[in-house]
Image (cartoon, grey):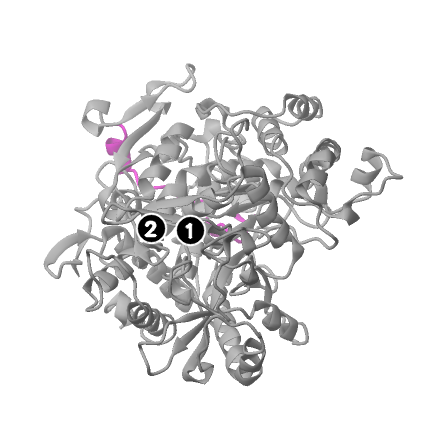
Amino acid sequence: MGLLSKGEPLTLEELDKKYSLMKEIATYQAIEALECSTLRNLDTFIFGDEVEYYIMALPEKDASLPPLLLLLSDEILNLLEHQQERRWDFCPEYAKFMIEGEPGVPFGFSIDDLAQMEFNLVHRRQYLHEILTANKEKFIERLNGHPDLDFDVDLHKYTFTPLTMPIFPTLGSKIPFTYPFFNAKGEGEPYSKSTRLSDRVISDHPRFYSLTRNVRQRRGGFHIERTSVNGNPVVGDAFGLGMGCCGLQVTFQFCDLEESLFIHDQLLALVPIFLALTAGSPFFLGKLVDSDVRVDNISEAVDDRTPTSRAPWSRYGINEAFLKCDGLQDVEFPYDTEVYETLRNAGCNTLLSKHIAFCLDKPVMTAYSTDFDESKSPEQLAASDESFKYLATFLSTTWQHVRWKPASHDSGCRVEFRPMEPQFTDFENSAFCIFINLLIRSILCYDISFLTKLSDIHSNIERAKNIDAVLNERFVFRSNPLKGGRCGRATNRVTAFGTALPIDIDICLAEIQSYKAERKLMLTPNGSEELLPMVGTVTPPPIAHLSETTKSYSGFIAKDGCPKLDEAVKSIDLLPLEIRGDDVHNVDTSLSSEEQIRTREMSISEIICGTDHFIGLSTIVRTFLSNFELEPETEERLELYIRFIERRACGVIPTPARFMRDFISKHADYSDEDNVITERIASDLMHKIYRIGFEDTNEMFGEMFE
């Protein structure tokens, strides 16, 4: 959720008075952070996930009882403070029915370490489940201690458990959805003034209350609007109807500044792909709606813009800029020119300077009385704060799909990938985080670039929001990703992943697995049998001329060096453009016709699995993995993750959104005309998700694990 400081939060009026001072201090800290980022150039590649859990109560026998979100996060966190377990860390989220979990220490450098992630997630969830079960009586007593309950139920008839999903089906609806449940009182709610969600669900940390109050006061209220599947508006009016959604993020630390900026830009191109692949939010306020993701719910909830605001977008979602490759930056955005000039004069690159100046151009949304010492100058305040909290105050309230984080005195440059929606199972959450991890390693090893025009990426994100976008939409995507080094890092630079291959057609060629290479009979979603593409694993020969120093440099690279990728792609990659159907972007007039950036509209299946004209992300990952002698268990598990993502991309395994739409629309209590998720529908659905998450993976994945 961002920076959780201590102290009394400032009012909106006080924040506006402090804005100029805070921006000045943050600018000093940005310069210091960039200097720190420049000096750190040998940091280890590590990563960690952040999974947000709903704390649930599921009726054990009586399906007419509603499933409930338990307002227990503060009690759980207080209890965990006294536990000796250090494999996980838990922290508060916006609402008391949510809790965020992450590994106690980051996952490590080696490929074999990837197998630890799912193990950690499984036991993290089980640990929370055991905490809830072992302390159930104590929690019931605490929950029943409120004197003014608007809904009463015997919690002994419920199972307490954590679940992972992006949005609760009846959140903000007319039926009870929390326990304790408090009817929202509109003007009687001190922070949100909501008629849909009581302020009493907000976590106790003052940051969450002050954000709610300040956004409402600046904007004049909250308005979150979706359209139901039968065409009617569905309107919410609370900050928590956006921030009460759960997320799945993964953060990576890179060896230096340049590498982190390069990967930030590459991940922007992957945002819409993984947004569509993980879609899991088909409802809002207890009704099915015409979108599959929660992005706009959150974006509209945190939107504090006024008619005079310069920002073209909400604080949540859209990235306004690449941070390294300016050749494809075709989107204009406002920024603080004074901050920009200061950063440029300090040696910061153009796009990164504009990005920081863009973030500092936004009003401050939260700060604390303890943040200011009137006896110190701005320079002294900046220098006395080694955590760069003034800069973080601005950056942590700009919730973009991909967030770049500068180095600090105790950590390197990091990039957080944020668009994914949490899945029902730890296997799925692990698969997506690890697939992104392997793509990043592959990008750095082969100096791949997926970059297209930023406006194309923005357009792709809009398409990814639609119902069944994973199957029905086509996305503008880079069709020659192995020709992109000039917009990326300098080639031939040794990194934690080995040496990047030169941009040379004889060396930087990809192994292509077209549909003719291998096919496997799979069951399609409608029950008919159809041949769908499956991509196999090929071990390419090594590059003979790499130096011995390079060959032995890194654990990420096999002893024989980077692979020479299959020559077969050469004839495909050099097909005439009219046959390939590509669009060409002349980013650099010095590039030859074969070095131009090419794009084409592709389905998610084509992007993941590949076609006769495109290598496919899964083939890139498999080619990278083929360079390592992995433990058999690790190799088998990584292959299972890849095959799962291929099946999701092809529609063989449905997205959580499609799974829930089908379940709700086929339920005996559901009416197309009313489009209401009743208590019984919600109860049956949450039991189904519980079984998938804890017990019966075959319910959703079929024979994949048999």
Q: Is residue 105 visible?
A: yes
Question: For the C terminus, which image quadrant?
Answer: bottom left
Left or right, 210 with reference to 668? right
Residue 307 sits above or below residue 184 on the image: above
**As shown in the figure, which amino acid type bears the numbered disc 1?**
Met
CB-based contact (under 8 Å), mark 2 and mark 1: yes
Q: Earlier in the sequence, mark 2 or mark 1?
A: 2
Q: Position of residue 302 (x, y in %)?
A: 51, 44
Q: Main secondary structure of the magenta part?
A: loop
In the image, 118 versus 158, the foreground residue is 158
Residue bearing mark 2: 277
In the image, 235 versus 569, the foreground residue is 235
Residue pictured at 53% horizontal, 54% vertical: 555
* SS under mark 2: helix
In the picture as drawn, the residue positioned furthest to the top comes out as: 589
Residue 80 sits above or below residue 550 on the image: below
Q: Position of residue 250 (x, y in %)?
A: 50, 53
* Highlighted magenta segment, given as a residue range: 551-574
The image's mark for residue 420 is 1
* SS under mark 1: loop
**As shown in the figure, which amino acid type bears the numbered disc 2?**
Leu
Gap in angstroms between the C-alphas marked 2 and 1: 8 Å
| Residue 555 among magenta residues | yes
